[in-house]
Image (cartoon, rainbow, N blue to C red):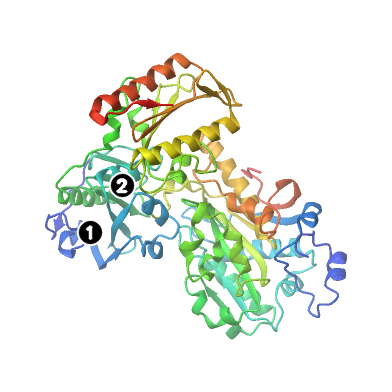
Amino acid sequence: MPMALFIVGGCISGRPGNSSEWPNVVGEWRLSGEIAEYTPETLYKYIDGAAEVYRSFNVRRVWARKYTKNGLSDIVVDVFEMATAADAFGVYRHEIRQGEDVGVGQESEYLRGTLSFWKGRFFVVITPYDDSAEVRETVLHIGRFLEKSFAEEGEQPRMLQYCPEEERQSGKIRYFHNHICLNQYYFLSDKNVLLLNQETEGLVVPYGDTENNRIILILVKYPDERSCSQAFTSFLEFLSETCLIQNGFAIHNDGTVTLSGRCAEYLVVVRNTPNKEHMNRLYHEVIASIQESGTNSRRKD
Amino acid sequence: MMYNRFSRRSFLKRSAGSAAGLISFVSSVSRADANEKTSRVVLVRDINVLDDQGVVNSSVLGRMLDDAVIALTEESDVSKAWKRVVSPDDTVGIKSNVAGPPRTPPELENVIRDRVVAAGVDPIRVAVDDRGVLNNPVFQKATALINVRPMRSHHWAGVGSLIKNYIMFSDNPPSWHEDSCANLAGLWELPIVRGKTRLNILVMLTPLFHSKGPHNYNKAYVWDYKGLLVGTDPVAVDATGLRIIEAKRLEFFGEYQPLPVSPKHIKLAETKFGLGIADPARIDVKKLGWEDGLLI
């Protein structure tokens, strides 16, 4: 049964760096201390180690606040302003999401007290170190209050439009810039064989609902055709050193197969299934979709 | 040398030139030597070290640590064992970790401080610190370090454990994050650290086996393991802690679920930096106490 909580203070204008943006009281929890603000350069002082994750998704600013109640651990609220909505989506999707979707923001998860959600360019995590019905209600109230302050929703990565929807496992899509993040979602190599950096954008998109028919699509957008071409050359060198090349397919030692190609500034990698026909179809659908989008591209492989 | 087992006879032979007979620490060995050596790690557990609310029982914790140090040094009693760790002439920095949860339990910090003082070190020359070590006069003058922190999975290093705990001795911690923190063992070459570490204690009371959120923590991913891992070789202790974390992940997720970031810095600590031994086949794990759910 929902608990009745009252909220005091706070106005809504989408500027979490301003103290007046935060509710002063939520139920028996009170806002405590001053707002702390961090930049990409200073974030490690607040969250050493994990800061690199947010820097990987182009964090611009972070605001942190605490709510306190006598006898209980603090509730910590962290608001991350990312460079783009795609980055907010990416940083939310960075982690395994096993918890309940509580309908806050564009996507949300509530797990053992912690609420995470993204909306627009903002990613929010509310962390209590206790877990109870009262804490849950308080955390959800704070989350919903903040959600309203971010007026505009944001787009998921635009390049998702090139990924066919049939059999797509949309809840498991990951977005990345660099190879350290890519390797957490799908391991290709210890080396940066796709020449990824903060200027590149990529998606890991799983297809098929079982391990037996699973295909992984990796789609990377480079700043220009030249850098994409260099990356494709690098990737082909990697494949030729580690795989048997047959009829355009790279056969790996473990029996998995890779099909890859380039279309304008996009590099397409399809992996994992022994069903080459299925892979081929997905690959050509992606290429056709990019070409149709008006990039005036053609396949070069 | 720290990489050998601590038989009393071999220890006395090795430390013949050392007046105090302290545990000696060598920060690098040749690869040829490393292949022949083993490291001892003591895993001590007690079901009563935490109550139902997770509150630490200090006396049980102190006994666990004493038992581990006795097993490590192969001395006959607590007093002799701790005098092998520090001497009255030492200035001792206890490098803790407050960045949790879980953080280093204050109860454990107090136990270590008490034992160091009981071994004859003037309390004014003992300090516990984490974030402020570079500006702490005791750490600046330290002749001995005791490294103590909890095992936590980590977003960028795979795991945050003993090797990584010295990152606060760097004046530029983010500079060690490159390549998923591959070169963390290089921290142990910094002048403020090199050759000073006498004891490494990896706190396994409530290890964090999966990272979540900016504060790297969710209650869903900790469990009451109620243990300490103790050794003189930080690499061997970390490698053993990692085995426990990986076993827990297998049990929890029901299938092999590798850490999102490979904790390769532990293996590189051996193969690139010669800091210690990461190969489980060359680590002698001595297990004491509670046996349920050991995982290794």
- Which element type, helix, strand or loop, lies under badge 2? strand
Q: Would you place residue A30 above or below residue A279 in this image?
A: below
Q: Would you place residue A98 above or below residue B123 in this image?
A: above
Question: Which residue matches tag 1?
Answer: A28
Name which of mark 1 and mark 2 comes first in the sequence: 1
Q: Would you place residue A67 above or below residue A171 in this image?
A: below
Q: Can residue B209 be seen in this snapshot?
A: yes
Q: What's the residue type where badge 2 is placed?
A: Leu
Q: Please give left or right for residue B37 compared with residue A5 in the image.
A: right
Question: Measuring 55% from the left and 46% from the top, which residue is drawn there?
Answer: B262
Question: Which residue matches tag 2?
Answer: A115
User: Which one is nearer the viewer's eye here, A239 or A46?
Assistant: A239
Chain ID of residue with mark 2: A
x%, y% of residue B140? 57, 80
Residue A109 is drawn in which quadrant? top left
Question: Measuring 72% from the left and 79% from the top, which residue is drawn there?
Answer: B87
Instruction: Spot the residue most to the top.
Output: A277
- Which element type, helix, strand or loop, lies under badge 1? loop
The N terminus of chain B lies in which quarter of the figure?
bottom right
User: Which one is nearer the viewer's eye here, A122 or A2?
Assistant: A122
Marks 1 and 2, Cα distance to the nearest angstrom? 19 Å
